[in-house]
Amino acid sequence: MPSNDIPHVHVKLFGLFRLDTGLHELDAQARRVKDLYPVLLREARAGNPATTITRADIDGCVVLVNGKQSKKSTKLSEGDTVYLMSPVCGG
Amino acid sequence: MATSYSGYMGKVLELDLTTRTAKEYPWTDEDRRLYIGGKIMAAKILDGMLTGHEDALSAENPVVISTGPLTGTGAPCSSRFNISALSPQTGIVASSNCGGTFGYHLKKAGLDALVIRGACETRSWISIENGEVEFHDAEADGVWGLRVTPAQERIEELLVQKWGARRAFGQLVIGPAGENLVLYAGVTSDERAAGRTGLGAVLGFKNVKGIAVFGNHEITVADPVRNAAWNKRFFKTLREHPLTGKQMPRMGTPGLVSPMQMRGMLATRNFSAGRFDAFDKVSGETLAEEANVANRGCVSCPIRCSRTVELDGQLVKGPELETLGLLSANIENDDLNVVLRLNHALNELGMDTISCAGTLAWAMEANERGLWECGLSFGSAQELEGIIEDIAYRRGIGADLADGSKRLARKYGGEEFAIQSKGLELSAYEPRRAVGMGLGYAVSNRGGCHLNGGYLVIMEGLGLFCDPQTPKAKADMTMMFQDLMEATAAAGQCLFSTYVFFPSMLITRPRGLVTTVVNKAAPHVGWALRAINKFPRAVHMHMPILPHTRSFEYATGMKMKMGDFMRSGERGYTLERYISQRFGISAKDDTLPKRLTDTPQDPADPTTKVPLDELKQTYYEARGWTPDGRPKVSTLQKLKIV
């Protein structure tokens, strides 16, 4: 159970990741971008059990936090918006 | 003039519209070796006809419609054909490439190319059956005045009546925009368009509404067994590649809207910004989820990039990335349905979506600045369908808009935000976040074109991520990609087939070690690219990243290693420039509007503008041109142009 001091962020998804899973956006708690990845993988598999998306695919995503290019190690703050785009779509 | 090479039909037909006569145009095997086909072949033919005094909208402007040796041989993505002539937008040699079935059927009719001279005295359409030409009265036949799809349907109806049966044939037509000499009118074959550079107006001036081709000649290949086996492998490579096997089939070119937004290169509000807040309402993902009902592809194409959408109960062609970006973000329209409607209207009226959308964006800004009170404004796209119709028929403000942004800016002011180069409006990639693409737009032979400009965005953020702001190595990369794409197009293949140039791993693992090394190293290998560009014999071999050369050899029987292929591309590129010099083109014309070269996209980051002067000089050096942008005599001799 995430604790309350972990930032709440809004995640929007793009690229084949979104088309394969039907997952457009979700709210999550994470201290860094990479902490979102297990959540995304879980939600992706829940959205489409047959998805071939792997952790490595998510690792390769292009990341924007509040419109700025970011890395998986980027720290998140309360209320941030995170854009994640699957790599084949413009890595 | 028969040929010893397979793949070619061995005949080029010269058609004089004024006298309504046809004869064979002399084209030798030596010409085929040097100029391959398609746009390079067309450039060589135009080189012998243009003196520098011709006007695009005149009977003296020759039109060359040419195929490549791979067209119809079963090679993947090989349905392309090319149209070259003087462009009414740029006033210099232009080429426009098209899918559809016309190229294939031109070869079935026994022809590699058509050379069209003069002008018809009356409104006409032309049919060519197994090389025999017949002129038809386009007005009496009810073809003149029709939009693109009804015109194609009417021509088919007339031919079926004549034949007494349905047959497979190819045709190209112009729409009302071409008839009314809109400077950016296109030419359409099936649902594909040779959209750019206004060649529809050139045919319209010549009173040619359409050309239909039919024949039952056999297209032979030199080594059928190896050709079939290699093409099977080539198809497999395309199907397994992440761009051509996944990305393009799922989203088509619109799939690039989101990555362009992420990279800050989605042209927004007439290129004053690189991101559009409402981009997801018009993204490739949204198009795929909400509007796309089917994919379509050209003959012998495994990619099937074309979108089909439903509009008013009809299935119609969906927008390409350029159209989607320029009719949404660039005019601040977030209504996908409006984009679909405008795209369909432009296609049916026979107009280049890029130039029309770029002109509308200029007009919106000019209106808001009080330079030209035309009533158009950003964010108000609903009324544009009527405006587009007015452009096609040159009514009201449409008469001005039909001349494009360069001429409008000369008339009303606002040249610094007329987003064009040499008179051709830029595509949807904002080059201040991809400076190599900025160079490409400026030096491109046909004006502000992303493809003829080398498409460096694929290295600068839409595939790889080599520092998009550095000018380092960009000139040499631009030359290399321009030449490779020039040769690919000349062979008759779609440029999307060159995506296999990028190993899958580089695309799917953008943070992998190899990709990271490539991204970091690329700006430092300009010297190596320069050496390869200068001495392409160094790559006198077939390379796995370029399967095209083996397809070429097995189809034609002509030796064509990677180095030969690059040199052919260089020859074509330089030849077009050499011809355009006669019309006064030099470094002064390789420009971008000041907005892109003088104003940083991000005011806090001075690197977010295109350092064009520096890039141009390196580019001219790489090409063996003078600092004034003219091919040196030694370069022309090396390429056997003179």
Image: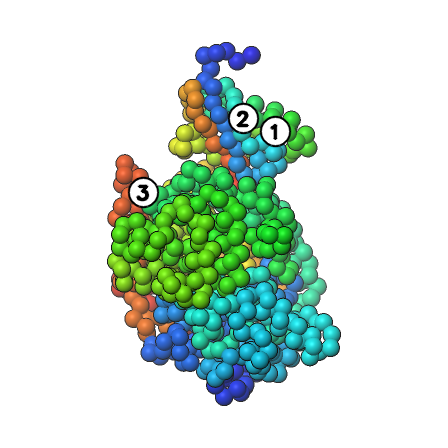
Q: Could you tell me which residue is drawn at 52 percent across and 71 percent down? A: B145
Marking on residue A44: 1
Mark 3: secondary structure: loop
Against B467, is B492 above or below?
below
Q: Chain of mark 2?
A: A
Against B273, is B189 above or below?
below
| Rendering colour mode | rainbow
- The amino acid sitting under disc 3 is Gln
Going from the N terminus, do you reach mark 1 or mark 2 first? 2
Q: Is residue B64 visible?
A: yes
Residue A75 x %, y %: 42, 22
The residues bearing labels 1 and 2 have C-alpha atoms spaced at a distance of 11 Å
The residues bearing labels 3 and 2 have C-alpha atoms spaced at a distance of 31 Å
Q: Chain of mark 3?
A: B
Residue B521 x %, y %: 40, 42
Q: Which residue was labeled with disc 2?
A: A26
Marking on residue B509: none
Quarter residue B441 falls in: bottom left
Q: Could you tell me which residue is drawn at 54 percent across and 29 percent down? A: A25
Q: Which residue was labeled with disc 3?
A: B601
- Comparing B476 with B399, the one in front is B399
Q: Could you tell me which residue is drawn at 36 percent across and 78 percent down? A: B54
- Comparing B602 with B119, the one in front is B119
Q: Could you tell me which residue is drawn at 50 percent across and 11 percent down? A: A3
The local crowd at label 3, few if under 14, some if 14 to 19, many if 20 or more residues have their Cα within 10 Å, is many
- The amino acid sitting under disc 1 is Ala
Q: Chain of mark 1?
A: A
- Comparing B611 with B521, the one in front is B611
Q: Is residue B464 visible?
A: no
Circles 1 and 2 on the same subunit: yes
Circles 3 and 2 on the same subunit: no
